[in-house]
Image: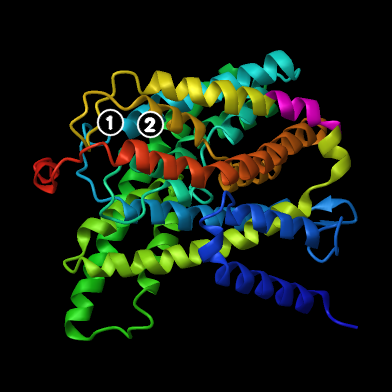
Amino acid sequence: MFDIYIIDLFLIGLVLLVVTLASGWITRLPLSFALIYLLVGIFLGPYGLGLIQLRRDDVFNAELLERLTEFVVIISVFSCGLKIIRPLNLRVWGITSRLIGILMPISILSLAAVGKLFLGMSWGEAILLGAILAPTDPVLASEVQLTDTNDRDELRFGLTSEGGLNDALAFPFVYFGIYALKDNNWNNWFKQWIAIDILWAIAAGIFMGILVPKIIVWFDQHIQKRRSADKLMEDFVGISIILLTYSLTEFVNGYGFLAVFVAGLVVQRSYHNPEKPLAQLEFIEQLEKLLEVGTILLLGSILLFKPMVDYAWQSLVVIIFLFVFIRPLGAWISTISKHPFSSHRYHLHPGTRWLFGWFGIRGVGSLYYLAYAFGNGLKGEVAEQIAWITYTTIVVSVIIHGISATPLMNWYESHIAKQTKPLPASTIDEFE
């Protein structure tokens, strides 16, 4: 009799080997790695071999899901920050400020309206649903993000920076929904929510995201002048920056996701040797890919046919509104009269604006917020409702965005990106 754990290790190892060896073909097909992991997760779950289970005696292990997805997200947002080499001023980051400052509120409030008007939720429950599903995912969106630190493409930059930031800035609305679930009288906690969960937590996240990596990089560079670290161990500095920045920020009630993204930006600019952060980025991306496998396998294993069918029409309403109306129209509104920094065009190409709207990929970030809500007061029938709507939305996103990412990005590269003359590096450097 074989141990189930050993069988799990064997099958996951087999999946990694097959996917790795076949990656050259997979990247050319309208198929994503996440979709493959999802199908394997379903096969390993209760409807297949039953080898991976987050449910024991009908008790769902939300804490394990929360901790795993939390770690995956902090790794991913740090990777997003490391990829970005752009001057830190508002003009250069204009597309990001629009996606976060305009599109995010549109998405959250529109989804909340759908929950209230069509799904029979209270405003607190509906806002929580909006906050869980509004953030785009930094983990599953690698195909549409910056390819390297020299990539100046406006679409890829916008999606990368949005993925790095919106997982942090959705948190205030997650807290809002949780508070509203516990107390319908908003006057009892609204001022505290503004002061602590918006002003303090965001400010603390930015401050700690600058301070902690600056200190670590300073120690790293000064110590290595005297005695170099072991080559095999150097890349672990990046992991230590992530963990220390996140934990210290959480100690002071700041947003750790925001701090870690800022830390990635700071690290990229702080080393005297530009190869050091590039080596960290390579290592972090490999770790991110490995964690993605585990997370999507778990997602596949927790899917159950009956509750997905029970909430199918509600999920369908949310999916249609989110993917067909809310995200595309919100992105179009957010990019009105936007001048692309990376080219001589006066406005963003219409195709670019629609692609911003289409690639609102949902994934690991939404799983984390859902699991966090489970541990902080979300329970009962509304918990089941929000959970299965979230799972189904992520599954549909993995399928439709996974299938469409490669052909759409190939079309974009051929018809828009190559026809858009980028600004020379000297022009961009003037903004430093």
Compared across the picture, whether 429 is left or right of 379 comes to: left
Q: Nearer the viewer, residue 314 or 383?
A: 314
Identified by mark 2, the residue type is Thr
Q: In terms of secondary structure, where does tag 2 sit?
A: helix
Q: Earlier in the sequence, mark 1 or mark 2?
A: 1
Q: Residue at x 57, y 48 (%)?
A: 30
| Quadrant of image for the C terminus | top left
Q: Nearer the viewer, residue 198 or 121?
A: 121
Q: Residue at x 66, y 58 (%)?
A: 37
Q: In terms of secondary structure, where does tag 1 sit?
A: helix
258 over 360 or under it: above or below: below
| Quadrant of image for the N terminus | bottom right
In the rendered structure, find residue 94 and report the number of the disc placed on it.
Answer: 1
- Range drawn in magenta: 310-317
In the rendered image, the residue lying farthest to the top is 117
Magenta segment: does it hold 314? yes
